[in-house]
Image (cartoon, rainbow, N blue to C red):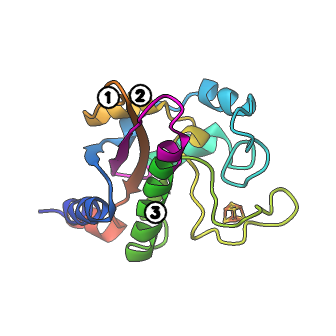
Amino acid sequence: MSCNTDIRTELTKAAQAHGATASASFDPREIELRSEVRDMCAADRCGRYGKNWMCPPGVASLDYWNRELERYDAGILLQVTVWLEDPFDYETMLAGEKRLKSVFRKLKKDFPPNGGELLFLQAGSCDVCETCTFPDLPCRFPELASPSLEAIGIVVTDLCRSAGLPYYYGDGSLTYSGAILVRQPVDKKVQK
Ligand code: SF4
């Protein structure tokens, strides 16, 4: 069993223990980043565009993220699905997003990024600080901050398809997705 498989298994087990409802592996090199996704961010429906280092335009260019994805050997898609009482059940919607963010917070604590060997891509904008320093000062906690899948141009439906998990679990469901990319250390690659 490779080092990568070990860490993936451990991350998956920990994610489930912390509240993820589904997880699956994918190949980060198969993911196509699309500028249209970031264009949707620019429409600012969530009100965070241009207000957070982990959202466009502060979160680096698509070229940067394309190069970045090439550096990782494996990915794990994590999901939290909640079931709404009705289409206006905002309480449950917020609880779902909060739960996935909490899973990521706990995983980052248990599995620190360790020099870039892990890259966390969460759901929604970074909310580590009450008010983000963007654009006046550098990010306060770069080791805790994570962009969302959409912020780097990932089409979440494509990612779910690539990982073999549904994007939509049926009537009344709402699913939040995030991912962790895993890079095997260079010395481990040489030993393969
Ligand atoms: S950690 Fe704080 S300063 Fe950095 S991106 Fe997140 S909210 Fe902004």
Q: Amino acid at mark 1?
A: Arg
Q: Residue at (42%, 65%) from the top-left corner? A: 117
Name the one closer to the observer, 4 or 84.
84
- SS at circle 1: helix
Q: Is residue 143 left or right of residue 45?
A: left
Task: Tell me, for residue 102, which label it has, or none.
Answer: 3
Read off the residue under disc 1: 161
Location of the C terminus by quadrant is bottom left
- Determine contact: label 1, label 2, CB under 8 Å: yes
Q: Position of residue 138 (x, y in %)?
A: 78, 66
Q: Residue at (50%, 37%) from the top-left corner? A: 89
Q: Is residue 119 left or right of residue 139?
A: left
Name the one closer to the observer, 108 or 99.
99
Q: Amino acid at mark 3?
A: Ser
Task: Tell me, for residue 157, which label it has, or none.
Answer: 2
Name the one closer to the observer, 28 or 149.
149
Foreground label between 1 and 3: 3
* Residue 90 among magenta residues: yes
Q: CA distance from mark 1 to mark 2?
A: 6 Å
Name the one closer to the observer, 180 or 99.
99
24 in relation to 160, above or below: below
- SS at circle 3: helix
Q: Magenta residues?
A: 71-94
